[in-house]
Image (cartoon, rainbow, N blue to C red):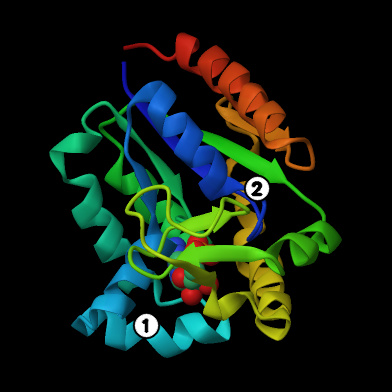
Amino acid sequence: MELNLVMLGPPGAGKGTQARQLRRRWNIPHISTGAMLREAVQAGTALGREVAAIMESGELIGDEVITRVVTERLAQPDTKYGFLLDGYPRTIPQAEALDHLVAARAPLIIVEIVLSEAEVVRRLASRMVCAECGINAVGEGTTCYDCGGPLVPRADDREQVVLNRLKVYREQTEPLVRYYGKRPTFCRIDGAQLPDDVTADIIREVEKHASRIPI
Ligand code: AMP
């Protein structure tokens, strides 16, 4: 079986936290475009230098650039049985590019995690990220669960930047809910619940949809 998941939802809705649980259950890679970009910035690559200032401002990097990154990532053999996309697509052109990219694969299952803006602002004020590998970590001690690196606040979680990221989400990413909303494989989850309850809801919905996908 192939499980191709897209996590939608505002910054701070818990996409990364959930993806981390779910990748273990289904044994598929968690592909976070934000983490890949933060790693590139950290490593000082050409891509990192190109996107650093844009990321700090909370704006989106160009569709072509990020689609190139995702295209290369989805070509890796570990995505054979599926993937969990976190942070991509974020615009309609990206969603169209993704549909094109996965045309020969099992249909996308889209999980929208719904959370109010007030709760987003509250959560992001205390969010940390790994200084070594760029992975998000919410309230999970002082070291990264993945690589053991030190956790620091995210540069783009400052309140002014968060407000801009929410605006960017509303204007550019929320239209994806309409883009995907009518598909039979679209599901909507209440992100204000406890993390384990969110995980349970996602598993139930996704496995219900997956069982209907012809293999
Ligand atoms: P995230 O960790 O998903 O919140 O992403 C952090 C930042 O990386 C975003 O605010 C954007 O600047 C950039 N970024 C990540 N994914 C994308 C994407 N799909 N399209 C454009 N920019 C992105």
Please give the residue where the numbered disc 2 appears in the rendered image. 177
CB under 8 Å between discs 2 and 1: no
Q: CA distance from mark 2 to mark 1?
A: 26 Å
Sequence order check, earlier mark of 2 and 1: 1
**Residue nearest the viewer, comparing 183 with 109:** 109
Q: Residues within 10 Å of mark 1 (few under 14, many from 20)?
A: many
Q: Toward which corner of the image does residue 196 lie, by quadrant?
A: top right
Q: Toward which corner of the image does residue 71 lie, by quadrant?
A: bottom left
Whole-percent x and y of residue 8? 58, 48
Task: Name the secondary structure under disc 2.
Answer: helix
Q: For the residue marked with disc 2, what is the amino acid? A: Val
Q: For the residue marked with disc 1, what is the amino acid? A: Val
Whole-percent x and y of residue 152? 51, 71
Whole-percent x and y of residue 191? 73, 41
**Residue nearest the viewer, comparing 127 with 203:** 127
Q: Mark 1: is the Cβ under 8 angstroms from ligand 1? A: yes
Mark on residue 51?
1
The residue sitting at 33% across, 67% down in the picture is 132
Image quadrant occupied by the N terminus: top left
The residue sitting at 82% across, 55% down in the picture is 116
Image quadrant occupied by the C terminus: top left
The residue sitting at 43% across, 77% down in the picture is 61
* Residue reaching furthest to the front: 142
* Residue reaching furthest to the left: 77
Q: Is residue 18 above or below residue 199?
A: below
Q: Is residue 194 above or below residue 202?
A: below
Q: Toward which corner of the image does residue 206 lie, by quadrant?
A: top right
Whole-percent x and y of residue 15? 57, 47
Q: Is 197 situated left or right of 72 in this image? A: right
Q: Is residue 72 above or below residue 180?
A: below
